[in-house]
Amino acid sequence: MVSEHVQSRSSRRLRTEEKIISAAAALFLEHGYRATTVRSIAQSAEVSVGRVMSTGDKDVLLVRCFDRWIGQLQSGTYAAPAKTKSRADAEAAAASAGTVLDGTDSGGTDSARTTSAGPRSGERPSAVQSHLLGIFLPFLEFFAAHEDLSRDYAAALMRVRGKPEVFDSLALDLQEQLVSSLTSIGIGEDYARTSASALYDSYLGILFRWAASTMSLDEAIHALLGIIAFHTRFGGPR
């Protein structure tokens, strides 16, 4: 009975935490990091401010939201939230003025999918290089669509103690996908694992550079393609 009671209490705690993360995620996407308050998260989740703070401060909540979004992008289960009327109105106004919003042009075409950037000037990426880029592309597109929030996320990562999932299980899962792709073209497993780790670290480096500069989505894609080309052009030791 005691064990069942403890499990029930732990289950309730986890459900409440998930509710808080869901509320924070929706508010961060809608209003941004700085405009979202702990109190507004508590109101949305229908819990006390103290209960929110026991889950984490805003930095921790933002990192946990990104862990969730990145995990969903990796598994292919991410679903963009429905646009609110204010968001739809803002996009309509931007489109009529010819202004770019959230990484898309006025026609709604994703710049990442129309870029012709290759590993080197005048050279188109190979099928394998394009496939490897495709593994990273959903994350690059997500960060481009939420550029200000992603910058706040990069800053929060520097402040939060502990080990976010993006440096742990999520990193390992993505690297396994990279290893599988690299070994499929005949690269030896040891070299493939070293390259997968280097590719992942380079990808994170590009994201931090993007967050701290005026780098565009096309420039981020081009930089990553160059690194992918380096790790695939010669194949490495078998």
Image: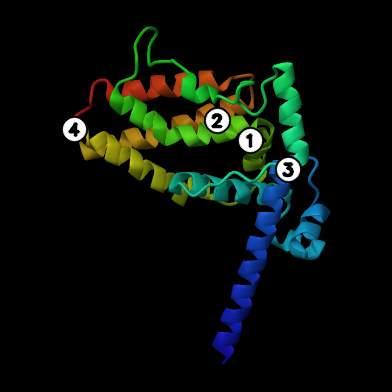
Mark 4 = which residue? 186
Q: Position of residue 231 (x, y in %)?
A: 31, 25
Distance in Å between CA atoms under marks 3 and 1? 20 Å
Circle nearer the N terminus (3, 1): 3
Circle nearer the N terminus (4, 1): 1
Distance in Å between CA atoms under marks 2 and 3? 28 Å
Q: How many marks?
A: 4
Q: Label 2: few (<14), some or many (≥20) within 10 Å?
A: many
Distance in Å between CA atoms under marks 2 and 4? 29 Å
Residue at 34% x, 14% y: name it: 124
Q: Label 1: few (<14), some or many (≥20) within 10 Å?
A: many
Q: Name the side, left or right, on which 17 lies relative to 185.
A: right
**Foreground: 8 or 198?**
8
Say which amino acid is labelled 2.
Answer: Leu
Say which amino acid is labelled 1.
Answer: Ser
| SS type, badge 2 | helix
Mark 2 = which residue? 207
Distance in Å between CA atoms under marks 4 and 3? 48 Å
Q: Nearer the viewer, mark 2 or mark 3?
A: 3
Residue 17 visible somewhere in the drawing: yes
| SS type, badge 4 | loop
Distance in Å between CA atoms under marks 2 and 1? 9 Å
Up-down: is 227 above or below 79? above
Mark 3 = which residue? 84
Residue at 34% x, 11% y: name it: 123
Say which amino acid is labelled 4.
Answer: Gly
